Amino acid sequence: MPVSRHELRHNDDVKTTPNAPRPVWSTRREELVLFLRGVTVRVAGRVAVVVGTVLSAVNQGSLIVAGDATGATWIRVSVNYLTPFVVTSIGYLAGCRAEPAHTRPSMTGRAGAAHRVPSTGADENAGHDGDEGQD
């Protein structure tokens, strides 16, 4: 069940409690609100520190050690930390996305079964040659 906007604004347990359940979102706006509230900081921050440090050491380390770092060098170093932070945040939030109703498991108990959105029937077989699933 998606988190309501009210819960997004007032549920501080999401970002402060280590064992809190992952937040669930269903719209890009809710995803952005979760990101801006910092729910990914704990996970993404750790990844960014490790990956950013390695990237900076490999790519700009010699300039920094030699004392030849310019403003452009420090911008590159910042990007080395920002990129893994954003990528990890996107991955974390992708795992929190609410499943659309038409892909949730069916109530029949069959593994992998899913509800299908009712078809209008008009274009149901258009463009199909009857060999679906045979690779």
Image (cartoon, rainbow, N blue to C red):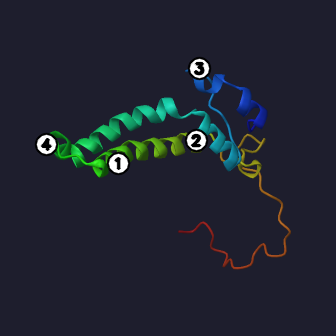
* Amino acid type, label 3: Thr
Q: Which of 50/131 is in front?
A: 50
Q: Residues within 10 Å of mark 4 (few under 14, many from 20)?
A: few
Residue at screen point 58% across, 41% down: 93
Q: What quarter of the picture does the N terminus occupy?
A: top right
Mark 3 or mark 4: whose residue is earlier in sequence: 3
The label nearer to you, 3 versus 4, is: 4
Query: At numbered mark 2, what does the secondary structure look like: helix, strand or loop?
Result: helix
Q: CA distance from mark 3 to mark 4?
A: 43 Å
The label nearer to you, 1 versus 3, is: 1
Classify 100 as above or below 121.
above
Mark 4 or mark 2: whose residue is earlier in sequence: 4
Residue at screen point 74% across, 35% down: 3
Residue at screen point 62% across, 31% down: 22
- The residue singled out by tag 1 in the image is 75
Q: CA distance from mark 1 to mark 4?
A: 17 Å
Q: Position of residue 60 (x, y in %)?
A: 23, 47
- The residue singled out by tag 3 in the image is 17
* Amino acid type, label 1: Ile
Q: Residues within 10 Å of mark 3 (few under 14, many from 20)?
A: few
Query: Which residue appears farthest toward the left when viewing the image?
Result: 66
Answer with left or right where residue 46 lies relative to residue 35. Answer: left
- The residue singled out by tag 4 in the image is 66
Answer with left or right where residue 94 lies relative to residue 121. Answer: left
Contact, mark 3 vs mark 2 (Cβ under 8 Å)? no
Which of the 4 image quarters holds residue 14?
top right
Mark 1 or mark 4: whose residue is earlier in sequence: 4
* Amino acid type, label 2: Leu
The label nearer to you, 4 versus 2, is: 4
Q: Residues within 10 Å of mark 2 (few under 14, many from 20)?
A: many
